[in-house]
């Protein structure tokens, strides 16, 4: 792999192979698997230290690591991103090159990811390249297409998620809140970021707070699935408490979307606890944020 990085950095080629250089290659392979920043090649910016690699990851051989690097650099991945990818997904330097090339071919030919977007996709989710096409990537692609998730090439990082272990459990959790299956799938289709959130650490406590402390129902979640994207302790709870103290019941978008200054100004102007009807002109005239994207916000909140 050192050969590949040096070639792409346009640095002078090292001397002929020696026992010392062979040993250094082995050290480089270990460094890339456990701590990519320890590979100090002139001309490349240092990468932040990743979390320690799992113990079950096999130690990559220099030839396998170099083959993986060659393929990724040829696909347009910058050398600095290659180090970052190796830190995020150490298996990347252990799987056969054929696995990586098959995943790249799947992303461009079947998932529709433009070749020029591959570096961006792989920067966000390098695990895509170690996921088997037949057992993981293709079934997930078919599931998301059947669900109706739009613009899948832009959301290609979802393809590494397991349908059984990651996608379906989130839909089933929404159904457990009392939402019909069709409504739960509609939420996931309109707001695919739901698939990134943990159930026990994110979705469940926020749903319990909404149904309990806020005394709302699951229909509010259906209309505004982005609710799960806001922090419970620093956004949802403080703003609900501020509204409750004034006896005001805001729609969730109006309560959570605006910045702090606009929220306080909006709250100060509220009288009573009855918000405008969803189809009232006042909903859009009064509840949108500073961006003014009324039509887009209205369309996104419709079933």
Image: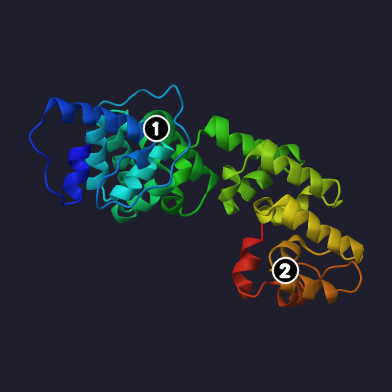
Per the model, the C-alpha gap separating discs 1 and 2 is 42 Å
> At 69% from the left edge and 52% from the top edge, which residue is drawn?
231
| Residue 123: image location, x then y, percent | 39, 48
Give residue 127's mark. none
> At 66% from the left edge and 44% from the top edge, which residue is drawn?
184
Q: What is the quadrant of residue 154 in the picture? A: bottom left
Give residue 260's mark. 2
Secondary structure of residue under mark 2: helix
Front-most of residues 80 and 131:
80
| Residue 12: image location, x then y, percent | 12, 48
Instruction: Describe residue 209's horizontal placement relative to residue 118 as left or right.
Output: right
Q: What is the quadrant of residue 139 in the picture? A: top left
Secondary structure of residue under mark 1: helix
Instruction: Describe residue 249's horizontal placement relative to residue 98 as left or right.
Output: right
The answer to whether 59 is drawn above or below residue 108 in the figure is: above
> At 30% from the left edge and 40% from the top edge, which residue is drawn?
39
| Residue 238: image location, x then y, percent | 80, 58
> At 90% from the left edge and 74% from the top edge, which residue is drawn?
271
- The quarter of the rendered structure image containing the C terminus is bottom right
The answer to whether 192 is drawn above or below residue 3 in the figure is: below
Label 1, on which residue?
Answer: 34
Say whether disc 1 or disc 2 marks the residue closer to the N-terminus. 1
Contact between labelled residues 2 and 1, with CB atoms less than 8 Å apart = no
Front-most of residues 295 and 101:
101
Extreme residue toward the front, this view: 20
Q: How many marks?
A: 2
Query: Which of the colour schemes (rainbow, by chain, secondary structure, one colour) is used?
Result: rainbow
């Amino acid at each position: 792999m050192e050969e590949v990085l040096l070639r792409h950095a346009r640095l002078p080629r090292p001397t002929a192979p020696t026992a010392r250089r062979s040993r250094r290659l082995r050290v480089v392979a270990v460094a890339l698997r456990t701590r990519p920043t320890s590979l100090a090649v002139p001309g490349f910016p240092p990468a932040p230290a990743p979390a320690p690699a799992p113990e079950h990851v096999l130690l990559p051989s220099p030839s396998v690591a170099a083959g993986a690097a060659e393929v990724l650099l040829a696909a347009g991945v910058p050398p600095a991103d290659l180090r970052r990818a190796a830190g995020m997904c150490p298996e990347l330097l252990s799987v056969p090159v054929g696995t990586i090339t098959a995943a790249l071919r799947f992303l461009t030919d079947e998932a529709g990811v433009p070749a020029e977007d591959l570096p961006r996709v792989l920067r966000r989710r390098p695990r895509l390249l170690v996921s088997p096409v037949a057992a993981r990537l293709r079934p997930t692609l078919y599931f998301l297409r059947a669900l109706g998730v739009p613009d899948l090439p832009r959301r290609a990082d979802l393809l590494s998620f397991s349908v059984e272990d990651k996608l379906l459990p989130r839909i089933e959790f929404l159904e457990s809140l009392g939402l019909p299956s069709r409504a739960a799938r509609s939420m996931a289709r309109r707001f695919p970021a739901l698939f990134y959130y943990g159930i026990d650490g994110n979705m469940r406590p926020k749903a319990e707070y909404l149904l309990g402390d806020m005394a709302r129902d699951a229909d509010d979640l259906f209309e505004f699935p982005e609710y799960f994207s806001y922090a419970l302790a620093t956004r949802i709870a403080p703003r609900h408490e501020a509204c409750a103290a004034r006896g005001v019941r805001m729609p969730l978008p109006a309560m959570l979307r605006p910045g702090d200054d606009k929220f306080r100004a909006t709250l100060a102007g509220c009288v009573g606890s009855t918000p405008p009807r969803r189809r009232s002109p006042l909903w859009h005239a009064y509840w949108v944020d500073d961006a003014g994207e009324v039509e887009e916000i209205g369309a996104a909140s419709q079933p």
